[in-house]
Amino acid sequence: MSAILNQKDTMLYRRFGKTEKKLSAITLGGMRFVHGWDEPRDVIPNDTFRQCLSTIKMAFDAGINHIETAWGYGKSENVYGTVLNEELSIPRNSYHLMTKGNALTASEMYDKVEKQLRALQTDYFDFYGWHGINNDELLQQSCKTGGSVEALLKLKEEGIIKHVGFSTHGPLHTITKAIETDLFDFVNLHYYYFDQRNLPAVEAAQQKDMGVFIISPNDKGGQLFKAPQKVRNATAPLTPIQWNARFCLQNEAIHTLSFGITEPEHFEEMRGIFPLQNNWQAENRAIQQKLDAFIHDDLFAHYDGYNMINDPSGINIPQVLRLRKLWKCYDMEDFAKYRYKIFQQKDHWFPGVYAFDSHIAKIDTSKIPTEIPLQEMLRETHKKLYVPEFKLANK
């Protein structure tokens, strides 16, 4: 069955895999409301409330019918619950709601879901994702018999959760293992023009008829809202955000993209994505050819280092090389610095240590192709992107 169900001038609707729900191709993401990360999570400042209220109104007017949030997004669930139910009294069956959370035991999972139901002022979730299956250990722990995924599936049997999925920032092999469990109805993952490594996972999900949700294409996809002039020139007459969205959505295995949009101009730019033709138009192909050509601006940009995952150095070599390519080939230095800063936070969301000389010395050189000066590439990248004394405020 074709994923395209309905096309309007300003919105596209696609079947979200086996869930059979018809979702807008743009999802309203709820991660970045003003003051959203301030404690306590259930106290909503007036400007947070007003921003959420205006955003929801604009989103519904633009044809968006899917809202996404998570326990880990601070005040997001509480402000959505207040605006949707107390302020606007929106009929619950008129939109689709996704939230996410994680726990390593069934009892903790039940407790968290109960708190989220109260925060969002609803008696069911259309979609609930186990938030952050980012490595094999978390996959094993969450999916074990009697574990937290099993708890979510029991809540599905009770109708409290309609569809269970997972979100991931993990490596490709972990994502495909999770898909192959057959436990999940949908997956939230990273896939953009500037990070295409997860295409095999998208294709694996399509084979399982799973819904495919793309995480943060405008921010984690390259901070496209402030893309360098080199990229803007290449994507013209489209903006980088518009072109990247078309690049993703030309693949019918992809059903919806999460946009953290809050201002009227954001919605106007979003409307420029549509209508999306069923075929990859000549204009879009020409833009891709321009962007693809920039790879030749660096002699070693073709090497992604994926064979060196979990290297004894502790350096996340594939991700460092990706950031190097974006800096070298696309002038995306600011984005590369923004992401490189997150290394050494010692968690599973963006694991790895900085490419200090002491770490480079521990690299397993037997895996490096003879023509690749990997150590020099890592040193060069670290020198360019490293910003000392950074503390991560939120994910």
Image: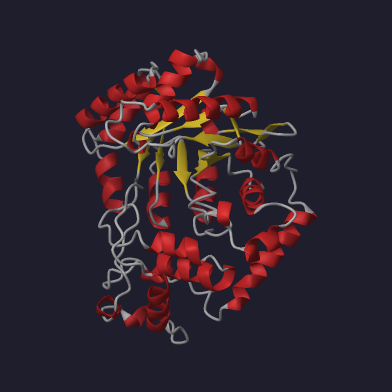
- In the picture as drawn, the residue positioned furthest to the right comes out as 282
Q: Quadrant of residue 308?
A: bottom left
Residue 81, given in percent of the width and then of the height, sits at 41, 21
Which residue lies at the image location 46% right of the left edge and 83% below the top edge? 372
Q: Quadrant of residue 165?
A: top left
- In the picture as drawn, the residue positioned furthest to the bottom comes out as 370
Task: Answer left or right for 225 relative to 113.
Answer: right
Is residue 361 shown above or below 75?
below
Is residue 293 shown above or below 350?
below
Which residue is more in the foreground, 108 or 53? 53
Which residue lies at the image location 56% right of the left edge and 68% below the top edge? 331
Residue 125, given in percent of the width and then of the height, sits at 42, 23
Which residue is more in the foreground, 105 or 354? 354
Task: Answer left or right for 353 relative to 34.
Answer: left
Is residue 200 shown above or below 151?
below
Is any atom of residue 117 visible in this view?
yes
Task: Answer left or right for 287 relative to 355.
Answer: right
Residue 60, given in percent of the width and then of the height, sits at 60, 25
Residue 16, given in percent of the width and then of the height, sits at 56, 33
